[in-house]
Image: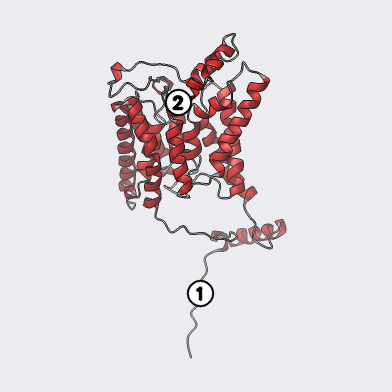
Amino acid sequence: MKQVEEVVLPPAGSLLLSSSPHIHQGESITTIMLKVLICLMPAIVASICMFGLNALLVLLYCTAFCTVFEYLWNLLLKQPQTVKDLSAVLTGVILAMNLPATVPWWICLIGSFVAIIIAKQIFGGLGQNPFNPAAVARVALLIGFAGPMTEWVNPMQGFATTSEFTTGATPLGTAQMAAGTEKALTTFESLESADALMQSFVGNVGGSLGETSALAILLGGIGLIVFRLIKWQIPFAIIGTTMLFTWLVSTVNPTLTPGALFHVCSGGLMLGAFFMATDMVTSPITHRGAFIYGVMIGLITCVIRIWGAYPDGVSFAIVIMNALVPLIDRICYKRPFGWSPASASALQMRRNEVK
């Protein structure tokens, strides 16, 4: 007679229940990160062409510092090394794309520490961080080091040294300074001219490495969608909401802000919409939740751009909405068949009893 082995199940409180379908992509973390890095190549090349050697140095600093911090953290805690999965490299590249070309090396060091240690590893590492690391680092640097973080340089100066750069305001900064003044209409008309919009779209304007060429970011964003690495609802909702809201505000009060096309082509909207807000770990898991998430990021970005203290608010909006992702998932998640509030309450009571 065969002996029947007793099967011991884990406590009910530790089981995660979710409705089907359960999809497994079959790709490793390294493969996914590599594909995202490939999609970032147009923006990387564009930034180096626009800002020269300094852009390359900022990219190298951030990538190296992020990788070193990841390695040291795992070494200190005696955890398996994760530097080979390229997640730290990707964080470093996206962080660099959020920085001006003239920032000193220690800004890259502090930003990398915040991104890897504060925003990622303290929460348990990749897959458990609630906030986008690069967005958190940019927000922290903007608040703590506003001077070097808002010193923009004019592009197309070749492989110049920092001392040879000429500074200039970004289109968003120019619009913010002119808003509500008697020069508003004239300034906005200049910023919204066909030539000015084309310069912003191509990247011949001042700004962070990844904020200048909307065209390069768009090409990479299309690659993300083709590779199925992101939910298309997020960038669609962010860009669409921004266009609609700024069009409404500029129509009601033309002296308050430029129109929709200006806001889409300027600042970090495209970078945030395609490469930061779409982070698999920190964005909603359902399509409906992703759309709501994107709409709210677009709205918060517009509010900060028009009425806030900073010319651009994309990173602030992403961090704020990252905090609300669990709530969005709870509201929008598809309930298993037969689920009801009463059954959920009974299940929770049983879990509490087990604990």
Q: Residue furthest top?
A: 182
In this rendering, would 31 be left or right of 323?
left
Residue flagged by tag 2: what amino acid is it?
Leu
Mark 2, Cα crowd under 10 Å, few <14 / some 14-19 / many 20+, is: some
Q: Secondary structure at mark 1?
A: loop
Q: Secondary structure at mark 2?
A: helix
Residue at 63%, 26% (x, y): give it: 247
For residue 137, above or below residue 156: below
In this rendering, would 291 be left or right of 62?
right
Front one among 114 and 102: 102
Q: Which residue is mark 2?
A: 142
Q: Which residue is mark 1?
A: 7
Residue at 63%, 49% (x, y): give it: 332
Front one among 189 and 252: 189
Residue at 43%, 47% (x, y): give it: 124
Give the position of the C terminus as an image quadrant: bottom right
Observer-side mark, 2 or 1, equals 2
Residue flagged by tag 1: what amino acid is it?
Val
